[in-house]
Image (tube, helix red, strand yellow):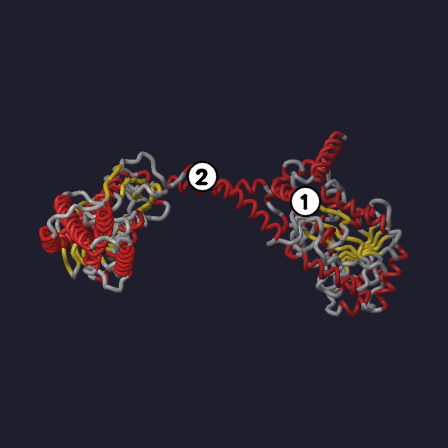
Amino acid sequence: MNHLTFNSTPAQRGGEHGQLSGRGLLRLMRDHWVEIVGIAAFIAALSVIYVLLATPIYSADVLVRVDPPDPNEFGLSSQTRETPPSVPSPDAEMAVMTSRSVLEPVIQRYRFDITVTPRSVPVLGAIAQKLASPGQPAAPWLGLRSFAWGGEQVRVASLEVPRALEEEKLTLVARDNGRYELFGPSGEPLLAGRVGEAASSRGVSMKIAELVARPGTNFEVIRWNGLDAVTRFAKSMKVTDRAKGTGLVEITYLDESPTRAVDVANAISQQYIAYAVAARQRTDSATLDFITKELPRLRAELLRSEQALADYQASAQSMQPTMESQAYLQGGIEFDRQIASLQIQRTQLLERYTPGSRWVTSVDTQIKQLHAAKSAFDARFTSMPVSERRNADLARDAKVAEAVYLGMVQKAEELSVRRASTTGGAHIVDDATVPLHPVKPEKLLIIPGGVALGLFCGVMSVFLRRHVMTGVTDPLYVEQRLNIPVVGEVLFSRHQARLDQEMEPPLRRRRVSGGAALMLQRSSARLHRSGSEQQNAVRGHGLTKVLADRFPTDLAVEGLRGVRTALSRDSAQAPNNVVMFTGPTPAAGKSFVAANLAVLHAEIGSRVLLIDADMRGGHLALNFGQPNRDGLSDVLRCEKEPRDVMREVGGVQGLWFISCGRPAHNSAALLMSRHFKDLLDRFSAEFDLVVIDTPPHPMTDADIIASTAGATVLVLRSGMQSEDEIADTVRKLDRAGARVVGAVFNAIPASRGNRYYDYALRIGSAESLGTAAS
């Protein structure tokens, strides 16, 4: 026998499963465009609703300039000393702007440590809030009087609670005549008061400055801890360096109210300036105090140096300095001035840092380097006369002492003036102005983004449902990946679904044929409704409930005629004329395909025998209005003769039928008997074609029958069987020695993108018009 070889390697060309091609994706989108557009419209509508209901957020910006530090802190110009850590920088000042020292006064001023939120119904409350006018509480919707419906206004002037109640949700209930009540997290009463008056009870004190609400309206009140209040507040502000190296810093604050956003942004900048002024004044005071303490010593040093110089010159009878002594004097003055400046700086640093700190050690290193350089400089003048050198040294000491003293005096005067001023190391360049438009929600971004997201979700929904959550849906995939030739494609039929409904209730629960109720989807029904009902108005005159007999022009029947043609071509190579139909799972439609093919073969003049071999629970007899008794199981039990169970189907010339008979739990044993093989040989000789409907493949009955049948046809239902189920069925049939000629792809949803559907629709319409004209 010719055995089918299962291809376990992926196909090189992807169908709708596996590697989806671009053409396949376009076809998938075209077939499900209504669903994709629906999902996109739904998500786009949600984005529009969000934009309409979301609270607008406004942004206010303040531009601040951070001034560079004073490089001459003590009035002594020095390029060698290292900048101490107290020097301000933009990065450091940006951190100061978000510090508690700056933000806490603003939080206290605007009571951002207290949040009061009206208790509202989700979505409905937001809609009502949009429709209400501020200061005019709206009437309650749906009789929910405890909820806020827009127009409420409340302003808490102060609220102090025990630490145990911090960040707990308290309930504020408005009463009539300006009264209110405050309840704890568990509903326990905390206090009662009146608007404008302070109230206290049980460790809680509260003062409400304004309360406009219907009596009975509830509000959620939270008193935040100081640290958490700063953290929450900082999330609404942003501090950025406008341009590197310029010292320009931008403070941005976001708020629901544009005027409050401006007020708070300006308040933050003003608070920072005040902090900077205070910090500058503290620094200036500390420096001035240090200079004041050093001035007496420096003055004494100056007087001593000048007196020493005068005494030496008097004793030496005032010599005229030479060129060499002038060079020695000028160079030594510069070295001594730098050393004196660093020593003063070291003295001040020791008041804040230990001698081992890196700032003090850095100054010590520079002093050592200057002393070394000075020693090298002095070594160049060893040949100078001692008297000239002594005179130059004393003159140098006097000039350095004078320069240091005068510089310190000048700096002290400058610090005294600056300490009394109200300017610090920063100033405001641009104050915040009231914004006209909110920055959130971003309508131009959210709505197009919602449309794009909706289209993406629509495509992904169709793709996942088609390729992940459902079984194989593409006949091309079956041929390419599973290496199973598809001998026919049968479209979904609404007429077959109606025929199923006309049969017995057990059949409607168990049978799913070419277009049965399991596949009665709204999308397919809509596609058929436009033309399929007209084209299928041409009805047959048969007495059966077989689609090919009752509705011969149905699109599904046209597909079955293609299966008939393919099987006829294969009959010359088949060892016998027995054709078996099976499926990987129940409800694949094998009974539907077997019955209709038997009718279609009979209508071309063939003598056909249709056998229901599902002796466990077959129902094929209902298609012909006949009972199951006196069937195949009775013959195999030797209780009936074959001629006694063969029934000629009325209205279909040349078609005979054998039912499954009484249920047989040992059906596998009956089929393995010699009697069954002899029976098939007899039927094969008496009829042109023997069609056998077998149980679904999880049962072993199909494998037994397949070994004796000349051709085995696998019936697959679109979207029902997975790749593994199909592959497993093929492997079992192969091991049983079956000659699998191909598969029938059943119940394919019709779509406008299906060329076969379009062509069949035109042909069916033409036949419908021709029949009506006759």
Instruction: Provide the residue designation for mark 1.
Output: 495
Seen at 32% across and 38% down, the residue is 131
Structural crowding at the residue carrying mark 2, measured as other residues with C-alpha within 10 Å and reported as few (<14), some (14–19) or many (≥20): many
Q: Position of residue 364 (x, y in %)?
A: 26, 60
| Residue 590 shows in this picture | no
For marks 2 and 1, give the one nearer the viewer. 2
Identify whether 744 is placed above or below 729. Answer: above
Q: Is residue 314 left or right of residue 348?
A: left
Q: Amino acid at mark 1?
A: His
* Helix, strand or loop for disc 2: helix
> Could you tell me how far apart the alpha carbons at marks 2 and 1 are, in whole angstroms?
44 Å
Q: Which mark is residue 435?
A: none
Q: Is residue 384 left or right of residue 514?
A: left
Q: Position of residue 451 (x, y in %)?
A: 49, 40
Q: Quadrant of the C terminus?
A: top right
Q: Nearer the viewer, residue 629 or 465?
A: 465
Q: Amino acid at mark 2?
A: Ile
Q: Position of residue 322 (x, y in %)?
A: 21, 46
**Most distant residue in the top direction:** 773
Which quadrant of the structure image shows residue 349? bottom left
| Residue 379 shows in this picture | yes
* Helix, strand or loop for disc 1: helix
Structural crowding at the residue carrying mark 1, measured as other residues with C-alpha within 10 Å and reported as few (<14), some (14–19) or many (≥20): many
Q: Nearer the viewer, residue 658 or 31?
A: 31
**Most distant residue in the right direction:** 685
Q: Nearer the viewer, residue 690 or 433?
A: 433
Q: Quadrant of the N terminus?
A: bottom right
Q: Which mark is residue 447?
A: 2
